[in-house]
């Protein structure tokens, strides 16, 4: 690796003095377009999280097993011999619904990104 030239060293000293006087400014380091693009991650991630939560709730309400146990007199999430089915599929509990949705949404995100 080559040492700094005198001109490069002067530029580096000037930049260090400016950041000491004015404080670090990320817009000077990266350019305003790059910083603004990175800030877009916040609303996009928030929207994706809210959308994922709503989708999970809808799939859980429609596909996840719900039954009424005649012995416990309670609504249960897993089928049993004394349970009467209320809604959903017999082989999907909460963990299975979460797993299936994770696989589907991750696949969609990978197709979109790549």
Image: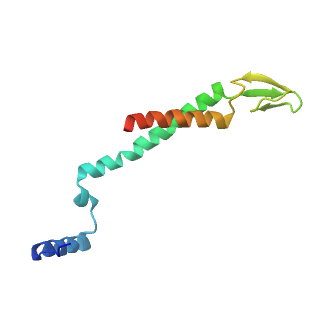
User: How far across and how far down the image is residue 75, in percent?
Assistant: 78, 31
* Quarter occupied by the C terminus: top left
Q: Toward which corner of the image does residue 23 lie, by quadrant?
A: bottom left
Give the left or right position of residue 5, taking residue 52 as reference. left
The residue at 86%/30% (across/down) is: 73
| Residue 51 seen in the current view | no
Q: Is residue 22 above or below residue 52?
A: below
Here the colouring is rainbow
The residue at 77%/27% (across/down) is: 67
* Quarter occupied by the N terminus: bottom left
From the viewer's side, name the closer residue of 13 and 79. 79
| Residue 80 seen in the current view | yes
Residue lying at the far left of the rendered structure: 7
The residue at 67%/35% (across/down) is: 94
From the viewer's side, name the closer residue of 13 and 81. 81
Q: Toward which corner of the image does residue 43 lie, by quadrant?
A: top left
Give the left or right position of residue 89, taking residue 58 as reference. right
User: How far across and how far down the image is residue 47, in percent?
Assistant: 45, 38
Give the left or right position of residue 50, taking residue 18 as reference. right
From the viewer's side, name the closer residue of 72 and 82. 82
Residue lying at the far front of the rendered structure: 1
Count of marks, rendered view? 0
The residue at 87%/33% (across/down) is: 72
Q: Is residue 47 above or below residue 64?
A: below
User: How far across and how far down the image is residue 4, in percent?
Assistant: 16, 74
User: How far across and how far down the image is residue 85, in percent?
Assistant: 77, 22
């Amino acid at each position: 690796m080559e040492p700094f030239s005198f001109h490069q060293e002067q530029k580096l000293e000037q930049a260090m003095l400016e950041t000491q006087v004015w404080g670090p400014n990320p817009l000077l380091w990266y350019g305003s377009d790059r910083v603004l693009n990175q800030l877009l991650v916040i609303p996009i991630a928030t929207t994706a999280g809210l959308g994922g939560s709503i989708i999970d709730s809808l799939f859980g309400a429609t596909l996840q097993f719900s039954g009424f146990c005649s012995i416990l007199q309670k609504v249960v999430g897993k089928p049993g011999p004394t349970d009467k089915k209320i809604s959903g599929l017999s082989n999907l509990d909460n963990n299975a619904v979460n797993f299936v949705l994770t696989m589907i949404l991750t696949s969609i995100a990978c197709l979109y990104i790549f």
